[in-house]
Amino acid sequence: ETQSALELCRTKKNSMKENSQRQLQLLSEMSSWCLQDLGTKVNRKKIETLVTVHVHQRDIAQELMQLVRAKKIQDANDFEWLKQARFYWRPNAGDDVSKDGATVVSITDVDFNYQYEYLGSKERLVITPLTDKCYIAL
């Protein structure tokens, strides 16, 4: 959604604000799940990890919205957006598992096909500007 909002920000003045509001609504919904009985510890860990990651996404969306307002970025090709880890579904691409589409992970100007590696359901520490820099360096 942020990608689309950045692509529209030149022609649709409130696209980034609307995107930020959607991010907040989604975060609010996911946060409310943490107050419910989720059945298992694994489910709770998954939801808490999603909330942690989405807090970072909310922060990025708000930062980008401020940069657009200040006219420091103008579209989705700006480094402030490109430096984020972004995930795309490419229906016309194939990978080693299926020719029916591919999930592509992009960071800066590098694209990787996601190869369905199972990393488990792990707890997640907060994501900071320093961890963002580490992802770029790796």
Image (tube, rainbow, N blue to C red):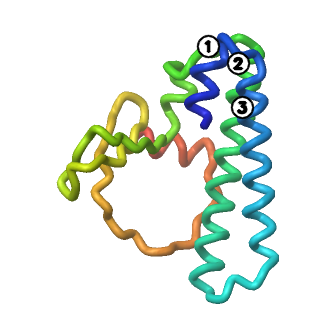
Q: Is 135 positioned to the left or the right of 138 in the image? A: right
Q: Residue 133, percent across and down?
A: 51, 40
Q: Residue 39, percent across and down?
A: 66, 88
Query: Disc 2 residue type?
Result: Val
CB within 8 Å, label 2 to label 1: yes
Q: Is residue 138 visible?
A: no
Query: Disc 3 residue type?
Result: Glu
Please, is residue 126 above or below residue 22 in the view?
below
Q: Which residue does the numbered mark 3 point to in the structure image?
A: 63
User: Viewer-proximal residue, 133 or 9?
Assistant: 9
Question: Residue at 36% of width from left, 69% of height from top?
Answer: 118
Quadrant where the N terminus lies? top right
Q: Which mark is residue 68?
A: 2
The secondary structure type at the circle numbered 3 is helix
Quadrant where the C terminus lies? top left
Q: Residue 124, percent across and down?
A: 58, 66
Q: Which mark is residue 74?
A: 1
Q: Is 45 positioned to the left or the right of 135 in the image? A: right
Q: Residue 33, percent across and down?
A: 75, 71
Of pointers 3 and 2, the one earlier in the residue sequence: 3
Q: Residues within 10 Å of mark 1 (few under 14, many from 20)?
A: some
Separation (CA) of disc 3 from disc 2: 9 Å
